[in-house]
């Protein structure tokens, strides 16, 4: 609209002036009141507010000499819709809150100047060619105190494009440039920030660029630290067992934004060692407590198992990585196996021996007729019985095995 407000009209040529005077005379005769307004417009040019916008201070300012009153400012944002701000007192300026501007915005000032309503518009585009801005920009806080950001070159960006990242704390309005780009040489496509002391709860991220070949569009975004913090896995997962129960304990993850135990929810994945983590029983969901623990019945002897824990924000959000697994129980696989297999194997052996003996005896009887060793056969049948003795003897052996199991479990606990 600013463009349509012409300055003082250039003096008309006499040839153009005459018909105008005629028209004026005519209208004066017909309706004197109607002629007054055009006459005033000729004398006083339509007021111009000369609106400007400073993206650094996010201030929309206009010419104070026009004594505009009842001013109202608007930001016409494609995603956020119109945002209205009123100036402070008699200031000829409005300060907008932080908003992403890379999509291009239109500002409007509505005011009253010398009794007339005035509306002035200012286009604030993202200068540069479409597709030159960095793409896929994302940032995350990790390990409770580091920030990584990544982005990709714009598809239409020239070969010599270089991108720069600026992060501004919206509360303190302090801006810092990324101290360490990756890669160090060549086009920057990432940023690593180890000192987050200047970071605020809400932050304005501006990713602009330069090139000798073409102007580069910028990309900007506002993220809260909470939105971008990735939770680390829970700390110090430990398992304590007595003869009947096991208790798993863990500590909440360290976070950069202050959180309480109520902000967390956990998942516990308890699996038999040989089944492989994540393959069997579904994870157990546990709400965060001041002292995180999960107690469950697990009578001895217990098989070797491992537990791992992960955490998420209770209000939703992605799960952290799994913690390192903590093992408990003992490798009792051989225990039940021995108990089951040894008698079977022994029984089979004894049966085989008895059968073998009988076979030899009958074959021997038929083939070799009466032989003295027949008496010895009885001895060997006694031998067979003797063979059975270890089998029965094995029962205490099993008890011994059980005892060993108990011992190993005690060792673990
Ligand atoms: C604005 O107000 C001041 C003081 O009230 C006055 O001197 C000045 O002429 C006014 N300007 C216009 C354009 O009316
Ligand atoms: C950005 O991410 C989208 C999907 O996440 C992917 O398809 C696209 O190739 C990425 N663009 C660049 C320039 O890496
Ligand atoms: C963060 O960036 C640094 C530097 O590029 C890199 O060494 C580190 O592995 C990144 N960390 C994560 C969690 O991606
Ligand atoms: C990028 O943004 C920073 C911070 O606002 C500014 O100082 C710098 O001049 C900008 N660079 C370009 C090329 O626009
Ligand atoms: C884990 O537990 C050990 C022993 O109690 C302790 O020394 C250590 O500080 C703990 N680590 C964390 C991160 O809590
Ligand atoms: C084992 O611990 C559980 C849970 O703390 C407890 O209820 C149980 O009495 C304990 N059993 C023995 C034998 O100490």
Image (spheres, rainbow, N blue to C red):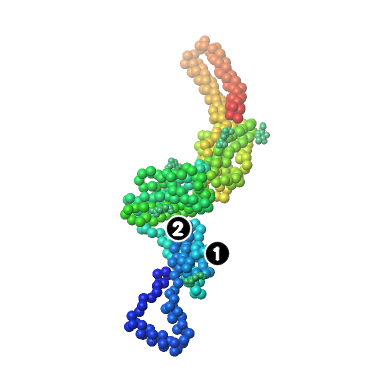
Mark 2 neighbour density, 10 Å: few (under 14) some (14–19) many (20 or more): few
Quadrant containing the C terminus in the rendered view: top right
Q: Is residue 93 above or below residue 355?
A: below
Give the residue pinned by disc 2: 55
Disc 2 Cβ-to-ligand 4 distance below 8 Å: yes
Residue in view at x 58 percent, y 46 percent: 259
Residue in view at x 38 percent, y 75 percent: 9
Q: Is residue 208 above or below residue 277?
A: below
Quadrant containing the N terminus in the rendered view: bottom left
Sequence order check: which comes first, mark 2 or mark 1?
2
Residue 248 shown left or right of residue 203 in the figure:
right
Is label 1 in a helix, a strand or a loop? loop
Give the residue pinned by disc 1: 89
**Distance Cα–Cα, label 2 vs label 1:** 22 Å
Mark 1 neighbour density, 10 Å: few (under 14) some (14–19) many (20 or more): few
**Taking the image as four quarters, which one is ligand 3 found in?**
top left
Question: Are circles 2 and 1 on residues that touch, CB within 8 Å?
Answer: no
Is label 2 in a helix, a strand or a loop? loop
Residue in view at x 50 percent, y 47 percent: 198
Residue at the outermost top position: 372
Mark 2 or mark 1, whichever is nearer to me: 1
Question: How far across and how far down the image is residue 230, in percent?
Answer: 51, 45
Question: How far across and how far down the image is residue 209, in percent?
Answer: 38, 52
Residue 207 shown left or right of residue 303 in the figure:
left
Q: Is residue 368 above or below residue 92?
A: above
Residue 157, numbered circle: none
**218 or 380: which is nearer to us?**
218
Residue at the outermost bottom position: 29
């Amino acid at each position: 609209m600013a463009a349509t407000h012409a300055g003082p009209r250039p003096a008309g040529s006499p040839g153009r002036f005459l018909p105008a005077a005629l028209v004026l005379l005519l209208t004066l005769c017909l309706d004197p009141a109607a002629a007054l307004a055009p006459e005033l417009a000729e004398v006083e040019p339509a007021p111009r507010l000369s609106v400007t916008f400073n993206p650094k201070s996010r201030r929309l300012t206009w010419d104070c000499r026009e004594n505009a009153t009842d001013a109202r400012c608007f930001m016409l944002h494609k995603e956020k819709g119109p945002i209205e701000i009123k100036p402070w007192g008699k200031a000829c300026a409005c300060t907008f809150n932080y908003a992403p501007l890379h999509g291009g915005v239109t500002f409007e000032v509505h005011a009253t100047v010398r009794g007339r309503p005035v509306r002035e518009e200012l286009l604030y585009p993202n200068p540069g060619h479409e597709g030159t801005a960095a793409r896929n920009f994302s940032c995350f806080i990790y390990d409770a105190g580091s920030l990584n950001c990544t982005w990709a070159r714009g598809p239409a960006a020239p070969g010599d494009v270089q991108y720069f990242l600026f992060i501004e704390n919206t509360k303190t309005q302090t801006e810092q440039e990324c101290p360490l780009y990756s890669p160090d040489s060549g086009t920057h496509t990432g940023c690593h920030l180890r000192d987050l002391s200047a970071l605020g709860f809400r932050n304005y991220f501006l990713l602009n660029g330069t090139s000798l070949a073409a102007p580069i569009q910028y990309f900007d975004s506002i993220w809260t630290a909470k939105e971008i913090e990735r939770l680390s896995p829970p700390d110090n997962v430990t398992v304590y067992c007595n003869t009947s129960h096991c208790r798993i304990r863990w500590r909440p993850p360290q976070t950069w934004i202050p959180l309480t135990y109520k902000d967390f929810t956990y998942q516990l994945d308890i699996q038999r060692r040989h089944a492989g983590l994540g393959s069997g029983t579904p994870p157990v969901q546990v709400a965060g407590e001041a002292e995180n623990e999960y107690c469950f019945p697990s009578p001895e002897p217990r098989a070797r198992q491992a537990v791992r824990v992960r955490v998420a924000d209770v209000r939703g959000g992605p799960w952290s990585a799994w913690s390192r697994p903590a093992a408990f129980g003992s490798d009792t696989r051989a225990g039940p196996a021995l108990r089951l297999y040894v008698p079977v194997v022994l029984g089979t052996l004894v049966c085989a021996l008895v059968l073998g003996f009988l076979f030899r005896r009958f074959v021997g009887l038929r083939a070799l007729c009466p032989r003295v060793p027949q008496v010895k056969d009885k001895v060997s049948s006694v031998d067979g019985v003797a063979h059975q003795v270890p089998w029965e003897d094995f029962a205490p052996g099993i008890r011994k095995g059980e005892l060993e199991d108990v011992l190993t479990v005690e060792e673990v606990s």
